[in-house]
Amino acid sequence: MSTVVADIAEENGIEKIENYDLIQINSGKVLEIQDGFAFAPSHHGFPGTVNENGDFMSPYSRSIPETFVGDSAQEAIPPVDKFTQNMLNNYAVEGKDGETGLPTGKFWINKDTARTIAGEVACTHYKKCGEDADTWLDSQDHNDNDATGTRFDVSWKYYDVNGQGRLDAVGMIANFMRHMFRSLGDLDLQ
């Protein structure tokens, strides 16, 4: 800030700004360029905030791979993996390009969301609901004698080998669930 502007500001009782990190200097894709931002299922259909003041967040419409669109009951359409379709539509977050902030079309499930899904799978497939599901998932009794931790954590570490805190929503999350629940029998997630 120039000394003249600073003097005028001081004379008028305007405080000098010390922390410029609090000033918005970008008028486009403010949210999308933030570290850690990903497109959640709840963002689908967001109209955006593009107006005369800038582009705080661009419109977003979730576009899942065509393989997971539709209903397997329709004629001339191959069977749809309903579990993965549900993951993509209701749980997975879509990654973003680090430079442009645009959606990448890559979907993933984080550890907390996977824990929620595991509780639902335990209830719908094995009749372990609520506290019963939590007790089973948090049990130290698992199939891997070399690992320590809860059933959920041991399975998570087995699939999240790079420690990224997320699994690919297409393919990996279904395999993760089958691995974790294998002691209870086959898990049909179609």
Image (tube, rainbow, N blue to C red):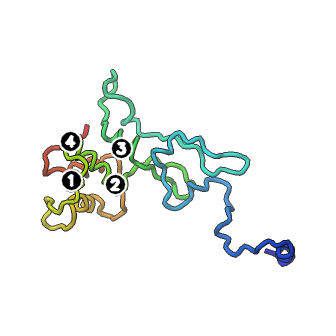
Depth check, mark 3 against mark 2: the one in front is: 3
Q: Are marks 4 and 1 in contact (CB under 8 Å)?
A: no
To which residue does mark 4 refer? Answer: 125
N-terminal label among 4 and 1: 4
Element under disc 3? helix
What amino acid type is highlighted by mark number 1? Met
Image quarter where the N terminus lies is bottom right
Q: CA distance from mark 1 to mark 2?
A: 14 Å
Which of disc 2 and disc 1 is earlier in sequence? Answer: 2
Mark 1 is surrounded, within 10 Å at the Cα level, by few (under 14), some (14 to 19) or many (20 or more) other residues, namely many
Residue wearing tag 1: 180
- Residue 114, given in percent of the width and then of the height, sits at 32, 52
- Within the image, what quadrant is residue 71 found in? top left
- Is there a contact, CB below 8 Å, between mark 3 and mark 2? no
Please, which residue is most extreme toward the top here? 75
Q: Is residue 92 above or below residue 15?
A: above
Quote the CA–CA distance across marks 3 and 4.
16 Å
Q: Nearer the viewer, residue 150 or 182?
A: 150
Tag 4's secondary structure?
A: helix
Q: Amino acid at mark 2?
A: Leu
C-alpha separation, residue under disc 4 versus residue under disc 1: 13 Å
- The circle drawn on residue 87 is 3
The residue wearing badge 2 is 167
Displayed quadrant of residue 16: bottom right
**What amino acid is found at the position of numbered circle 4 in the picture?**
His
